[in-house]
Amino acid sequence: MDRDEKKLTGREPGKQTAHRRRRRSRPKNKSAVKGRRSRGAQSAKARKRAGFDIISTTVLIVAVCVFVFSLYQLVMMLVPYYTGSEEYDAIKEYAITEGSDGEGFRVDFDALLQENPDTVAWIRFDEPSVISYPVVKSADNKEYLTKSFSANDNKLGTIFVDMRCSSDFSDRNTLVYGHNLRVSGRMFSKLLEYEDQSFYEENPYFYIYTPDGKVRTYTIFAASVVDETADNYNITYASDADFEEYLQLCKSSSLYDTGVEVNAQSRIVSLSTCTNGAETERFLVQGVLTAED
């Protein structure tokens, strides 16, 4: 039997059984391969996930850094507005007295001159009431652009008279400058309220107080948007006729007709600030002296 079996199969019986065992063991080897492949795939996914986590963490850190830096920049931008406003509020505390109804407005020029010898006046509006500040005059027109009344470096600057004008407001035209600030509404920012004729009609006056004890009331006769090089900034007039021509120029360039009369004998104050438009564009509010006490 063993010999015949060998003839038919070419294998001895024991070897045939071993061969069958080897064939039966092959499925187990396939499972092992699949397991190794599965573990390899999982390892690759883990590596991809780790790489993604690193990128996400890096992006988050960069975003946080950008946010913190932007916040720092914002704070640094706003701090001068806050400190400048605090300073001018403190000046009002020690230099100004007035009744509860707004009457009896008094300026302590002795205190102001002790703080800053460049003091020449105080300017005040009923509205916008935020415009109530000391006025200075320097040897140039740059110093007080970035210098506060108390000599601190500050973007609010100080309200100042043009260096070419007299300090006592006796000129035919006294130019006064102040910043228009995009934040805080301080200095001459609210002067732009006079672009609206109805606002002008409700608030046509402003007041200049000087160390000699005088209180000058000015009635606004023109509110104009002009270029910084416009003839509206001319303060030199060869004759009465030249001055009258200048006054007519100012009235004709005004945003609206105020109906206020001006002539060769007028004494005016021109308040200048920037607009929110072109860099060289200016807003000019001009008042004529109508009372002096």
Image (tube, rainbow, N blue to C red):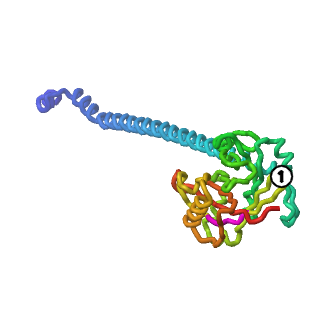
Tally the numbered discs. 1
Instruction: Please name whichever residue, 218 or 75, is drawn nearer the observer in this view of the structure.
Output: 218
Point 74% across, 48% down: residue: 167
Q: Is residue 48 above or below residue 158?
A: above
Instruction: Please name whichever residue, 131 or 60, is drawn nearer the observer in this view of the structure.
Output: 131
Q: Which quadrant of the figure has residue 117?
A: top right
Query: Does residue 184 appear in this view?
Result: no
The amino acid on which the numbered mark 1 sits, given as a three-letter code, is: Asp
Point 60% across, 71% down: residue: 257
Point 81% across, 42% down: residue: 115
Q: Is residue 251 above or below residue 84?
A: below
On the image, the x and y values in percent for residue 23 come to 26, 34
Q: Is residue 195 magenta?
A: no
Residue sitting at the far left: 7
Quadrant position of the N terminus in the picture: top left
Q: Which residue is mark 1?
A: 212
Q: Is residue 9 left or right of residue 260?
A: left
**What residue span does the magenta drawing correspond to?**
218-222
Q: Which quadrant of the figure has residue 206?
A: bottom right
Q: Main secondary structure of the magenta part?
A: strand
Query: Does residue 10 appear in this view?
Result: yes
Instruction: Please name whichever residue, 223 or 48, is drawn nearer the observer in this view of the structure.
Output: 223
Quadrant position of the C terminus in the picture: bottom right
Mark 1 burial class by Cα count in 10 Å: few <14, some 14-19, many 20+: few
On the image, the x and y values in percent for residue 242 come to 58, 58
On the image, the x and y values in percent for residue 243 come to 61, 59
Q: Is residue 219 magenta?
A: yes
The secondary structure type at the circle numbered 1 is: loop
Q: Is residue 103 left or right of residue 290?
A: right
Q: Which quadrant of the figure has residue 203?
A: bottom right
On the image, the x and y values in percent for residue 251 come to 59, 66
